[in-house]
Image (cartoon, rainbow, N blue to C red):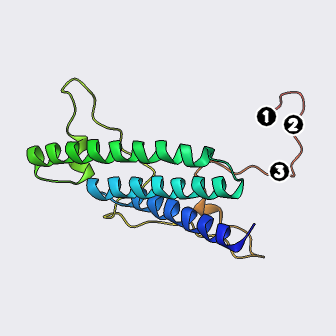
Amino acid sequence: MSPDYERFLVVGAALFALGAIGFLSRRNLILMVLSAEMMLHGVGLSLVTFSRLHQSLEGQAFTVFVLTVAACEAGLALSLILLLYQSKKSLDINVWTEAREADLPPPVEVSGVPSKDEPQVFPKLTPAGLPPDPSRFSSQPTRDINASPKKGGQS
């Protein structure tokens, strides 16, 4: 593989990765659409590079379809964003969780993610070589693992 092909593949992977990071980290609808568009262009560049590398036109044919889908996606998404902005005057994703039919339940909140108001509490590990402090564990009585079980059901 020549260095030129490697450079094109690295640029395609970088476009896809930056688009994915942008899509997952942004809350603005327009930036999310632009990030999805960047991901599609990264895929198109990689398809054309592999097509040239293997001297076949199949990757370029797929790229034409990817670009067509990207253009349709951009047109529809931007028209929907414009329509939604006119009704709510905001492009934040959280505002659009309220835009649902009246008989649908509210969206499920993720409980594993702490809010910004609550400080994160991380467990403290016992330093190596010291016995663990039993008061940090649950209030259930501790069991001696070295004790032999009682036979015959005696208490």
Label 1: which residue?
Answer: 155
Q: Residue 74 placed where, x, y %?
A: 31, 48
Q: Residue at x 31, y 59 (%)?
A: 31
* Of the image marks 2 and 1, the number of the one nearer the N terminus: 2
Visible residue check, residue 28: no
Q: Image point 65% across, 62% down: which residue?
A: 134
Q: Amino acid at mark 1?
A: Ser
The x and y percentages for residue 38 are: 42, 58
Question: What is the C-alpha distance between the residues marked 1 and 3?
Answer: 17 Å
Comparing labels 1 and 3, the label whose residue is closer to the camera: 3
Viewer-nearest residue: 117 or 67: 67
In this view, which residue lies farthest toward the top? 103
User: Which residue is tagged 3?
Assistant: 145
User: What residue is drawn where x is 65% and y is 57%?
Assistant: 52
Q: CA distance from mark 2 to mark 1?
A: 8 Å
The picture places residue 68, in percent across and down from the top left corner, at 40, 43
Which quadrant would the N terminus be assigned to in this image?
bottom right
Q: Could you tell me the amino acid type at mark 3?
A: Ile
Label 3 residue SS: loop
Of label 1 and label 3, which has the lower sequence position? 3
Q: Quadrant of residue 26?
A: bottom left
Is residue 155 shown above or below 90? above
Q: Nearer the viewer, mark 2 or mark 3?
A: 3
- Quarter of the image with the C terminus is top right
Residue pointed to by mark 2: 150
> How far, Cα to Cα, is label 2 from label 3?
13 Å
Seen in the picture, residue 3 relative to 144 is either above or below; the reply is below
